[in-house]
Amino acid sequence: MNEAKMLADERAFEHFSRDEFRRRMERTALVCVGLFASAWVIGRIVLAGRDLEGPGRLWLAVLTGIALASWLAFRRLPLAARHPMFFGLLMHSATAWGAAMHVSQMGPLDSPFFYVIYTLPPLSISMPCRLPSRIAMTLSGAGVFAVTYFARNPEMLGHPMIHVPMVVLSAVTVASVVLGHNVQRLMRDRFLFGLRLERQRAQLAAHAQRLEQEVEDR
């Protein structure tokens, strides 16, 4: 394969990745709308009359609004289609902020609520993007969450076991970047293989047509 075809294939993959990133973020946002809205309803039933009911009443509604706005942006906004990575970072960071605002009012590090932070880095694994963008997206969610949580609960920084969630979070973040990058490479290899296969099919079809024409001419 000559260099021109290789460059054309790489550009085609970049275009495919950008469109696929937008589609996946759109689907993710829609799933989040359902999850946050369902959590709001369930929380109002299960936690009715308890102190833990208050934070969710506000912040799950905010998270639902963030997810809905993100879905509409990815589905309808041309700017989001042209710059899906920027809008993806914005959605991911805004969701992490809303989640941290919520759980920061639910309990200290000894409670289970803080540990939803572990779910944020893996969300980037399936997203098709280059390594620098993947690192930025993976770090943004966990980073925004941690900064927001500890800004609202600075006394938790003195917790004797603070190193445990930090070590686990670091491991989850690194693993998410590595796995996501491997997924991206597999996706790229599959896409480029598909392009080569299409070219070979076209060449074989053209060759078969020429042979057929030669037979008819005889």
Image (cartoon, helix red, strand yellow):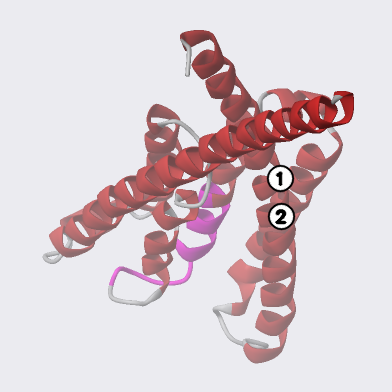
Q: Position of residue 152 (x, y in %)?
A: 41, 51
Q: Residues within 10 Å of mark 2 (few under 14, many from 20)?
A: some
Who's the residue at 37% across and 67% down the image? 115
The label on residue 23 is 1
* Res 87 visible: no
Give the position of the C terminus as an image quadrant.
Answer: top right
Magenta-highlighted residues: 96-109
Who's the residue at 51% across and 52% down the image? 126
Residue 159, placed above or below residue 203: below
Q: Position of residue 33 (x, y in %)?
A: 73, 61
Residue 68, placed above or below residue 17: below
Q: Which residue is mark 2?
A: 27
Marks 2 and 1 in Cβ contact (< 8 Å): yes
Left or right: where does residue 178 sit relative to residue 100? left
Residue farthest to the top? 4
The one of 137 and 65 positioned closer to us in this rendering = 137
Q: Position of residue 212 (x, y in %)?
A: 81, 33
Q: Residues within 10 Å of mark 1 (few under 14, many from 20)?
A: some
Say which amino acid is labelled 2: Arg
The one of 171 and 162 positioned closer to us in this rendering = 171
The label on residue 118 is none
The question of residue 104 being in magenta is answered with: yes
Left or right: where does residue 73 sit relative to residue 154? right
Q: Position of residue 6 (x, y in %)?
A: 50, 18
Who's the residue at 45% across and 51% down the image? 125
